Image: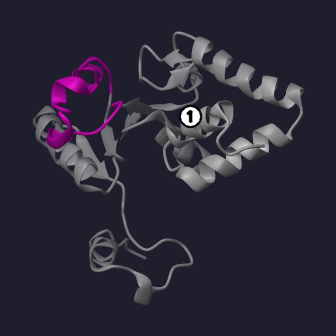
Amino acid sequence: MNENSDSLKKLIEEFTKLPGIGPKSAQRLAMHVLKGSMDQAKALAFAIVKAKQSLRYCEVCNNLTEEKICPVCQDQRRDKSTICVVEEPKDVLAIEKSASFNGIYHVLLGALSPLDGVEPKDLKIDELLDRIRQSAVKEVIIATDSDSEGEATALYLVQLIKPLGIKISRIACGIPAGGNLEYADQTTLGRALQGRLPL
């Protein structure tokens, strides 16, 4: 197929709009789709459209769900006294895969970023404070990213939650499992030391 084909160009262009996909990866994805059968291409297109039509934000925690309230919020076995605050629904997926948390979540749908015009009013912070005030929450775990936006969001949340008399904790950041100290940057190593656990 000619690289100058309008349909191929358009397909590659659409793939480059996805996060983490550069021009070469987009070209590989486009070629993979074109190499597959028409049924495979239709199945991919259908899955994208169906997900876009059926998924919405949970009315309680803002996680993605097909119902008004997500399965985590509906699950009576979850510890409702502990809320883990994350930036995006993808973070809930990551934590759930670890199978190490049995509380509930609150998804902010972003992080503070004044340079990008993201202010507190643009996030689901007021909803978080309402949940804390209206329920028997004992601990809030802040699990925002460790980049500058995530750290700024964490500090802002601490200022708002501390006066409510609720225990606040921050997920530890440090050396990944199987990692070597010599390859860790200074910030990561510093955080690993600060977040050390007693043995």
| 197 vs 23: above or below | below
Residue shown at 80% from the left, 25% from the top: 43
Q: Position of residue 162 (x, y in %)?
A: 14, 40
Q: Nearer the viewer, residue 188 or 50?
A: 50
Q: Nearer the viewer, residue 75 or 8?
A: 8
Q: Position of residue 109 (x, y in %)?
A: 36, 30
Look at the image and say whether residue 137 sits in the magenta stretch. no
Q: Nearer the viewer, residue 37 or 180?
A: 37
- Within 10 Å of disc 1 (Cα), the crowding (few <14, some 14-19, many 20+) is few
Image quarter where the N terminus lies is: top right
Q: Nearer the viewer, residue 164 or 192?
A: 192
Residue shown at 51% from the left, 79% from the top: 179
| Disc 1 target residue | 14
Image quarter where the C terminus lies is: bottom left
Q: Position of residue 174 (x, y in %)?
A: 38, 70
Assign a secondary structure to mark 1. helix
**Three-letter amino acid code at disc 1?**
Glu
Residue shown at 33% from the left, 73% from the top: 188
| 12 vs 130: above or below | below
* Quadrant housing residue 9: top right
Look at the image and say whether residue 125 sits in the magenta stretch. yes
Q: Which residues are magenta?
A: 108-136
